[in-house]
């Protein structure tokens, strides 16, 4: 497992990464904590909701909730919502219609200058967004 130390920045982890790790029976807290090293992990309300809503076991949900609590949280302020709306409008005019939740997550990452770690190709269509792919970062993918 390679650490993103060469990247030297904050990484906002998309919900599909947490879900993928949980499906592989890999503890996301331990795994991502080791992977990120001295860099910061970030989250936002949309990612937290997408992850927690799919967890069936209450104990696992509590553990994930505790992990989200200690990460850098990007609040969805009016500025972030406005940026997401601007991004949606711009991309729509270019013929690129992306899901609103992905646009919001991308706007949160852009707001704090973070990369997004995601297996979702939608993020690759967002200009100026640094995207890390799990298959490039993790041996378990």
Image (spheres, rainbow, N blue to C red):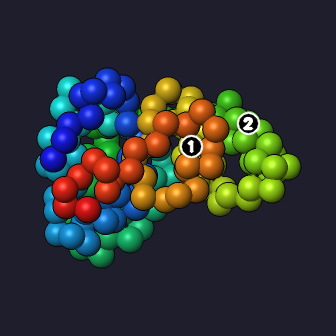
Q: Which residue is mark 1?
A: 106
Q: Who is closer to the viewer here, 25 or 6?
A: 6
Discs 2, 1 touching: Cβ within 8 Å? no
Image position of 50 (left or right of 40): right
Give the residue displayed 56% in from the left and 43% down from the top.
106
Residue 107 percent coordinates (x, y)? 60, 39
Give the residue displayed 42% in from the left and 58% down from the top.
119
Mark 1 residue element: helix
Q: Which residue is mark 2?
A: 82
Q: Is residue 25 above or below residue 65?
A: below
Mark 2 or mark 1: whose residue is earlier in sequence? 2
Residue 96 percent coordinates (x, y)? 74, 55
Q: Is residue 67 visible?
A: yes
Residue 3 percent coordinates (x, y)? 20, 37
Q: Who is closer to the viewer here, 6 or 100?
A: 6
Quadrant of residue 37 within the rendered picture: top left
């Amino acid at each position: 497992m390679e650490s993103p130390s060469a990247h030297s920045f904050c990484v906002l982890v998309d919900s599909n990464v947490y879900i993928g790790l949980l499906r592989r029976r890999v503890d996301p807290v331990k795994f991502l904590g080791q992977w990120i090293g001295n860099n910061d992990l970030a989250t936002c309300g949309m990612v937290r909701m997408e992850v927690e809503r799919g967890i069936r076991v209450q104990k696992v949900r509590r553990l994930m909730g505790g992990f989200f609590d200690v990460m850098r949280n990007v609040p969805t302020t009016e500025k972030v919502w406005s940026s997401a709306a601007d991004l949606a409008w711009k991309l729509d005019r270019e013929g690129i219609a992306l899901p609103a939740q992905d646009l919001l997550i991308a706007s949160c990452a852009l707001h704090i200058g973070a990369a997004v770690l995601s297996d979702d190709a939608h993020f690759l269509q967002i200009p100026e967004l640094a995207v890390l792919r799990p298959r490039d970062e993790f041996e378990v993918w």
